Image (cartoon, rainbow, N blue to C red):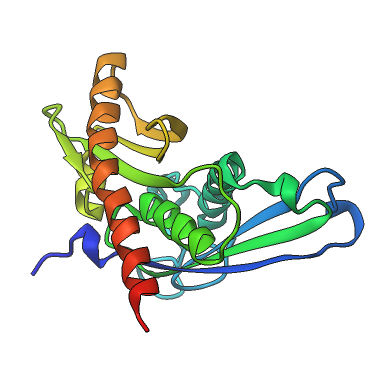
Amino acid sequence: SPPSPGDTSVLAGIYGPAEVKGSKELPDRAALEVLLRPKVGLPGGCPPSRGVPGVSPAPAERPPVPSPGVIERSREQLLRRTCEAVVLGVLHPRTAITLVLQVLSDAGSLLSCCLNAACMGLLDAGLPLSSLFCGVTCALDPDGVIVLDPTTRQEQEARAVLTFAIDSAERKVLTVTTKGSCSVEEMQQCLAAAQRAADTIFQFYRDSVRRRYSKS
């Protein structure tokens, strides 16, 4: 069967609040760091070349694909900004909190899966949060139809891909990233669809926590 976004999985690990030394220490709040580990290879590595072994393709044949390290660093920054918006770091000044996200499989909508794994990790670690958040990815196909939780192929064929981080208190947008082109009206339609989908994700959070703590 073809892959679905349900085949995307990310493992989250939280370390801290722990003692921090040197320039990373913040006197008024905890320093939050997010590390995103790809499924294969090391962050910042070059993508493997394809073609005849030992023969490098001509420059014109190489598409301008961003380095995996560049993509991961960009995602790390967005994840960190999202977490910082809800983590009550002022309760743990001069400490460090490290969130490590390990990609286990990627069949599409990876960033929203990372956002959801990050929130579940923070929640499970018992860190103080002002609210929860979730990630929802929307793709606009060439006809302008909105596809929620697109697969990798649907993302590649889409005219635009948008990922929203939405908070649980007022369904506000904490962060958003876009790739491709869309109108303001289309973006608003994607946001409305993402906010509706967020209700299902927050219910999943509640059910997961209930199951975890109802076990004897």
Q: Nearer the viewer, residue 50 or 36?
A: 36
Q: Position of residue 93 (x, y in %)?
A: 80, 51
Residue at the spot x=48%, y=57% of the render?
A: 118
Q: Residue at 58% across / 39% down in the picture?
A: 85
Query: Relative to 144, is 177 above or below?
Result: below
Percent x, y of residue 94: 84, 54
Which quadrant of the rendered structure holds the C terminus?
bottom left
Residue at the image point whose x is 61% and y is 47% from the top: 87
Judge by depth and name the residue closer to the eye, 182 or 61: 182
- In the picture provided, is 140 more to the left or to the right than 54? left
Q: Is 192 above or below relative to 27?
A: above
In the rendered image of this protein, does residue 146 appear above or below residue 60? above
Q: Please state if 95 lies on the left or on the right of 72 as rendered.
A: right
Is 214 left, or right, of 173 in this rendering?
left
Q: Residue furthest bottom?
A: 216
Looking at the image, which residue sits at the far left?
A: 1
Of residues 149 and 151, the one nearer the viewer is 149
Give how far across and how far down residue 5 sits, in percent: 23, 58
Name the quarter where the N terminus is drawn.
bottom left
**How many marks can you see?**
0
Location of residue 144 (image quadrant): top left
In percent of width and height, residue 138 lies at: 26, 39
The quarter of the picture where residue 51 lies is: bottom left
